[in-house]
């Protein structure tokens, strides 16, 4: 199917016209965003932890230290909520009440499984690296056995999922359109600046092309 089936938990109820359930929208948001927030409850205490992730097909992968309480807890199969958000622009209205933000967000509900197969685990670590920068995995030293052992990887199936998107300009009250106030959208693209070399970089090592030409969302460098 090309869309996720909304459930009572993922159906967008507040401004439902902004809800999106098609895989293309969901996958594009997840593939562009860097950080997700992982929500879970331990002994009645809610936690929301920001972390990096990677997606392949219908699976979202999370990773971190083997000592991580979050990963250790989630590996036990407790319910989890993962969200990812992109901020595209500030929506500046003529009134304070109608100021907003253009955004794209995804909410994922489910339970994660511990990745124990070494091949899948290494593939997930490659995925995390490539999610940050395509082509980077083949340029670097890859994880050794000790590093692999010290890393926990979880897989969360993309089954109960929804997206929510706001685009466009401000929507003011009709009478406010006559106010002498500038209104519109201030776009906030991810625009990299010049790379900064590590202080201990060996002489003669050029900046790779995938670094100099980096673009997260198609916005060219200035």
Image (spheres, grey):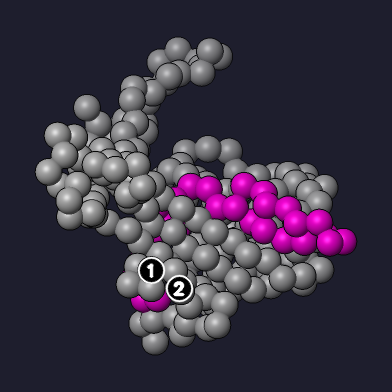
Q: Residue 15 carries which label?
A: 1
Q: Is residue 41 magenta?
A: yes
Q: What element carries label 2?
A: loop
How many numbered badges does the structure rendering display? 2
Q: Nearer the viewer, residue 8 or 144?
A: 8
Tag 2 residue = 12
Magenta residue span: 21-50
Q: Nearer the viewer, residue 63 or 186?
A: 186
Q: Do the residues labelled 1 and 2 touch (CB within 8 Å)?
A: yes
Q: In this view, does 104 lie above or below 65?
A: below
Q: In this view, does 155 lie above or below 37?
A: below
Residue at 61% over, 48% down: 51
Quick one: label 2, few (<14), some, or many (20+) residues within 10 Å?
Answer: some
Residue 6 percent coordinates (x, y): 47, 82
Residue 97 percent coordinates (x, y): 36, 47
Q: Which of 153 and 108 is in front in this view?
A: 108
């Amino acid at each position: 199917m090309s869309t996720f089936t909304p459930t009572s938990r993922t159906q967008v109820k507040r401004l439902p016209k902004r809800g999106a359930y098609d895989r293309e929208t969901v996958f594009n948001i997840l593939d562009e965003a860097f950080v997700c927030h992982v929500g879970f409850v331990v002994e009645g205490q809610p936690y929301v932890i920001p972390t990096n992730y990677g997606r392949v097909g219908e699976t979202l992968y999370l990773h971190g230290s083997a000592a991580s309480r979050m990963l250790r807890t989630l590996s036990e199969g407790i319910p989890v909520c993962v969200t990812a958000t992109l901020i595209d622009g500030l929506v500046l209205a003529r009134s304070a009440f109608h100021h907003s933000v253009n955004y794209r967000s995804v909410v994922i509900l489910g339970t994660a499984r511990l990745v124990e197969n070494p091949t899948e685990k290494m593939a997930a670590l490659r995925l995390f690296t490539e999610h940050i920068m395509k082509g980077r995995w083949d340029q670097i030293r890859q994880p050794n056995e000790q590093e692999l052992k010290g890393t926990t990887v979880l897989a969360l199936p993309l089954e109960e999922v929804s997206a929510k998107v706001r685009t466009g300009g401000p929507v003011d009250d009709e009478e406010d359109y006559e106010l002498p106030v500038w209104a519109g959208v201030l776009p906030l693209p991810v625009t990299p600046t010049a790379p900064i070399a590590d202080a201990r970089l060996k002489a003669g090592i050029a900046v790779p092309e995938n670094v100099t030409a980096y673009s997260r969302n198609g916005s060219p460098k200035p």
